[in-house]
Image (cartoon, rainbow, N blue to C red):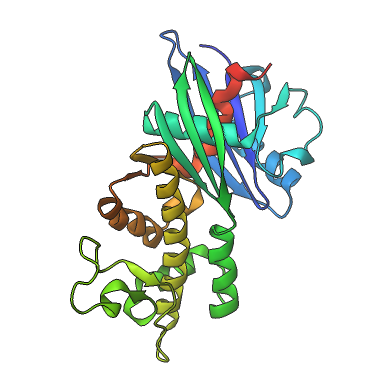
Amino acid sequence: MSKAVIGIDVGGTTTKIVGFRSLENGAEELIAPQFVRATDPLTSVYGAFGKFTAENGLGLSDISQVLMTGAGAGHLRGPIYDLDCRPVPEFSSIGIGGLYLSGLDEAIVVSMGTGTALIHAKKENGGCQIEYLGGTGVGGGTLVGLSRKLLGVDNIDHIEQLCSEGDLANIDLRIKDLSHAHTYQGINENLTASNFGNVSDLASSGDLALGIANMVAETIAMLSIFAARSYKLQNIVLTGNLTTISSIRSVFENLSDSFGVRFIIPENSQFGTVIGAALSKNTVG
């Protein structure tokens, strides 16, 4: 069996790591992705590397290369334990990872991290053509920051629990609240007309948490839909940590039919970027 290629995605407080081995039939074997949290990128990188190699029984001699991506990757300026360690562009990693996880040849790939990036990815001529389309500062950082300020809560698990207790009727203004005679024919009357446009004086913490999560998800969803339309595509692959939050996932599920797109949240979606980094071995010299 060939040596493993390790991918590492270095965020501000979270580092993700994954490995791939090439099999005799040409397929790539995924070595279970993991993540660790730490107060600084270097601690996070070495913690993730140590945990990953120990739990998967990998020695340094079993690894051929380490490919790094993410905003914090620049903090590591040398090899890891003398291993060949090279940077990979984050946007390329997002696109490659999204296509791999979804099994598609072309899609809009959305990375929902602290902020949000949109990529057009297409397999072509044996490689992967990547185009960065832009993004938005609305993302996980928005969810956590507003929840901290408005609710005094910044733990994702606690935010998700609050969301499960919320009711958007106490927060958002919907199309049906504006029109009583089906003025907007052909449009789903349950769509949001104004986020936080109908905040009740009696809105609970759960209502507010759900309103924040809904606003973040709808903003990302609509930008993704506009991007897909510009390429005449229906497939939108969602990756990043926000894909694991049920209240976020449900927004995309509800919007698919209304706008004729297919939002795809594949298995291991939160590891899309680091998987793409590891699979970039053929594009890194």
70 lies above or below 67: below
At which x and y percent is residue 33? 51, 37
Q: Is residue 88 above or below residue 159?
A: above
Observer-nearest of 178 and 116: 178
Instruction: State whether residue 6 appears in this view.
Output: yes
Q: Quadrant of residue 9?
A: top right
Q: Position of residue 231 (x, y in %)?
A: 41, 36
The residue drawn where x is 60% and y is 47% is: 36
The residue at the far top in this view is 24
Within the image, what quadrant is residue 217 found in?
bottom left
Furthest residue in direction front, as rendered: 183
Task: Write the residue at 42% across / 60% down.
Answer: 218
User: At 54% across and 30% down in the image, what residue appears?
Assistant: 130
**At which x and y percent is residue 227?**
45, 44
Q: Residue furthest right?
A: 77
Q: Nearer the viewer, residue 224 or 55?
A: 224
User: In this image, 21 relative to 285: left or right?
Assistant: left
Q: Position of residue 2 (x, y in %)?
A: 54, 12
Image quarter in which the C terminus is found: top right
Q: How many marks?
A: 0
Is residue 237 at least partly visible in the picture? no
Q: Residue furthest bottom?
A: 201
